[in-house]
Image (spheres, rainbow, N blue to C red):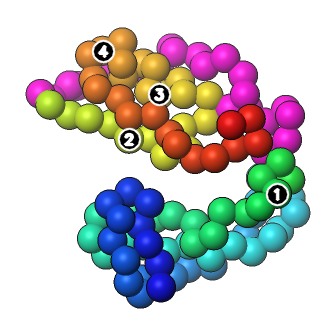
Amino acid sequence: MEQCRVCHWKGNAEKHEAREMMQGQGDSFTYFVCPHCNSLQIAEIPVELEKYYGKEYYSYSRPDCSVGIVQKQNSTRILDVGCGAGAFLCQMAKQGYTCVLDTAPSPRD
Ligand SMILES: [Zn+2]
């Protein structure tokens, strides 16, 4: 049984297998799609996150806020799961959006 980390739904969800490709280790992970909010998330967060997010991982650098302009709609809030260095959210906040930061755990938390 899965529990959604976004909306807290609990139940049996559609699952998908994917291999880690960025570090080239090829480890396989199970992801599920929440049928309530349609978010895709990893079923179990690896215990050894530093294996996948080393000291040189790009999200530990200062964000570049030079992303292009998008059209704002009233009351739009943005959740960027896995936001890296936060460049996209930084730019959206400058344009007046209410941004919710990524809460994914990392070795630096
Ligand atoms: Zn959900």
Q: Is residue 74 left or right of residue 5?
A: left
Q: Residues within 10 Å of mark 1 (few under 14, many from 20)?
A: few
Quarter of the picture containing the C terminus is: top right
Residue 63 shown in magenta? yes
Residue 19 shown in magenta? no
Q: Is residue 57 above or below residue 38?
A: above
Check contact, mark 4 vs mark 3: CB within 8 A.
no
Q: Which mark is residue 88?
A: 3
Cα separation between marks 4 and 1: 36 Å
Closer to the chain start, of discs 1 and 2, is 1
Closer to the chain start, of discs 4 and 3, is 3
Residue shown at 49% from the left, 46% from the top = 81
Q: At which x and y percent is residue 23? A: 84, 53
Q: Nearer the viewer, mark 1 or mark 3?
A: 1
Cα separation between marks 2 and 4: 15 Å
Check contact, mark 1 vs mark 2: CB within 8 A.
no
Q: Nearer the viewer, mark 2 or mark 4?
A: 2
Cα separation between marks 4 and 3: 11 Å
Q: Nearer the viewer, mark 4 or mark 1?
A: 1
Q: Is residue 95 left or right of residue 52?
A: left
Q: Secondary structure at mark 4?
A: loop
Amino acid type, mark 3:
Phe
Q: Residues within 10 Å of mark 4 (few under 14, many from 20)?
A: few
Q: At which x and y percent is residue 61? A: 72, 22
Q: Quadrant of residue 54?
A: top right
Closer to the chain start, of discs 2 and 4, is 2
Q: Which region is colored magenta?
A: 53-74
Residue under circle 2?
79
Residue under circle 1?
48
Q: Which secondary structure is most common in the magenta stretch?
A: loop
